Amino acid sequence: MIDKHGLLSAPIGRVLFNMSFPNLIGILTIYGGSLIDTFFISQLGTDALTAVSFTFPVAVVFASIAIGIGAAVSTNLARLIGAGHHDKAKNFLFDALLLTFLLVSVLVSLGIMAIDPLFTLMGANEKTLPLIHDYMLIWFISAPLLVLLMVGNQGIRATGDTRSPAIIMSVAAIINLVLDPFLIFGIGPFPRLEIQGAAIATLVSWVVSFTVSVYILVFKKQILEMMSLCKLRIKKNWKTLGHIARPAALMNMLNPIANGVILAMLARADQAAVAAYGAGIRLETLFIVVTMAMTSSLMPFVGQNLGAGQHKRAKEGMLLALRFAFVFQSLMYIPILLSGESIAKLFSSDPLVIDWLSFYIQVLPAAYGWLAIVIMFATCLNAYHRPLKSLVINVIRLFGLMLPLAALGMYLGGVKGLLIAIPVTNVIMGIACYIMACRITEHPSVKYTNNNSNGNSGSDSGVTNSADSVI
C-alpha cells in the first residue's frame, strides 16, 4: 500500500501540521464567511439577527447528521485504506452517500411542515417568526446539498488529502460572501431580498461546492462510482456505518438541543440576550478554529494507523494534538479578552446586545482549552470504534452538567449566571477527558487485515467490531 500522505510513517507532528493547515484555511474561510453573513444580517436590525439566531439549533441538527455519518465514513474508509481494501472503500462510500440522501430528504420534508410550531416552541415571537419562515424555507431546500457535501469531504479526508476539502469549502464561502450583499440589500440589478437573500446566497454556494466535491471523489481520487443496488451489500455497509454514525450523529444533535433549551431560557429573560448568544455561537466556532482543523485531521490519522496495526503511533498522535490544542486555545484567550467589546460592536448597534455579547466573549473563551480536549477526544473515540463512549461523554457534559448548572445560574444570577455555567462545565469535562485519553488502549477484539488485496476476501468492512469496552 502506498502511504502517499505519510500518515503511517512520517513524523507525527509534521503529518498533523501538514493535514491541519489546509483544514485551518478552509474552516477559517467558511466560518469567516458565516460571520460576515451574520454581520450583513445584523445590519437589517435586531429582529433579523434574533431570527437567524433561533434557526441555528435546527441548522446544527442537519450538520450533526452530516458529522455523524461523516465520522463513520472517515474512520471506516481510513481503516479500509490503511488495510489496503480500496474496492471495499468505494462500495462503502457509495452506500453511505445513498443513506445520507434518503435520510436528509425525509427530515427536510418534516422540517418544512414544522417551521411555525417548532420555532414558536423555542420562543420566537410575532416579530421574528415571519423572518424565520422566510429564511428556513429556502434553507431546508438546500440542506441535502450541505449534508452530502460534508460527508463527501470526509471521504476525501479519509485518503489523507485535507487540501481539497479546504478548497471546496473556501469556494463555498467566497461565493456566499460575494452574493450576500447583493441579494440581502438589493445592490445593482438584484432585488432587495433581505433575510431570504442570505439563504439564497447559501444555496448557490452549496450547489457549486457540491459539484466540485463530486468531481474530486469520482475523477481525482477515484473513490466513488455508481454501484448496483445490491441489497445484501447495502445492508452490511449500512450496518457498519450505523455502528458509528448513529451514536455520533446523536451526540452532535445533543448540542443543538441543548442550545435550543438555552435559547428558550434566554428568550424568556431577554430577546437581546438571544441575539447575542446566536452571534456568540458563531464567534465561538471561529475562536476554536484551530481545534476544529486538528480534529478533522485526527480522524484519518488515527483511523489509518489503527487500520495498519500501529496502535502506539495512533495514541501518540492523539495526545500530541490534545496538548497542543489546550495550550493554543488557552493562550488565545488573552487577545480575545482584550478585544471583546470591539468585536461585539461589529455585530450590533443595540446597547443591550453589545453588553451581552461582550460578556459572552469575556467569559466563555476562558475554558476553550478544556473544550478543545473534549471535542478532540470524543472524535478520536469514533476512530477507536467506541462511539457509545463518545455519546456518553456528550450526554454527561450537556445534560448532566451544563443544563442543570445553566438553570441554577439563571436562578441565582440571571443571564450572566447562565453563561458562566458553560465554561465551568467545559473545565470539568476537559479534565475528565484528558485522563481517559491517557488511559485509552485499542480494543483487543478489533481485527485488522493489513494487506494489499483488492478487497475480495475477508470481512466486508475490513474490521470486526464488538461492543465497546471500558476505557
Image: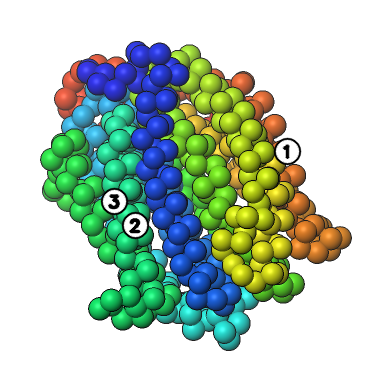
Q: Residue furthest bottom?
A: 126
**Image point (25%, 78%), residue name:** 189
Up the image or down, 456 lies above or below 425; here it is above
The front one of 162 and 122 is 162
Q: Residues within 10 Å of mark 3 (few under 14, many from 20)?
A: many
Q: CA distance from mark 1 to mark 2?
A: 33 Å
| Picture quadrant where residue 418 is located | bottom right
Determine which of the numbered discs, if any, sits on residue 146 in the image: 2
Mark closest to the chain's N terminus, 1 or 2: 2
Q: Position of residue 433 (x, y in %)?
A: 64, 32
Query: Which three-letter amino acid code belongs to the residue tagged 2?
Result: Leu
Determine which of the numbered discs, if any, sits on residue 428 in the image: 1
Q: Position of residue 267 (x, y in %)?
A: 68, 72
Q: Is residue 130 left or right of residue 439?
A: left
Q: Nearer the viewer, mark 3 or mark 1?
A: 3
Q: Is residue 317 left or right of residue 105?
A: right
Query: Which three-letter amino acid code belongs to the residue tagged 3?
Result: Val
For label 3, the SS is helix
The front one of 406 and 97 is 406
Q: Position of residue 206 (x, y in %)?
A: 30, 58
Up the image or down, 64 lies above or below 156; here it is below
| Residue designated by label 3 | 171
Marks 2 and 3 close (CB-CB < 8 Å): no
Q: Nearer the viewer, mark 2 or mark 3?
A: 3
**Image point (32%, 61%), residue name:** 178
Quadrant that contains the C terminus: top right
Quadrant that contains the N terminus: top left
Q: Is residue 451 left or right of residue 431?
A: left
Q: Residues within 10 Å of mark 2 (few under 14, many from 20)?
A: many
The front one of 18 and 1 is 18
- Residue 285 visible within the image: yes
For label 1, the SS is helix
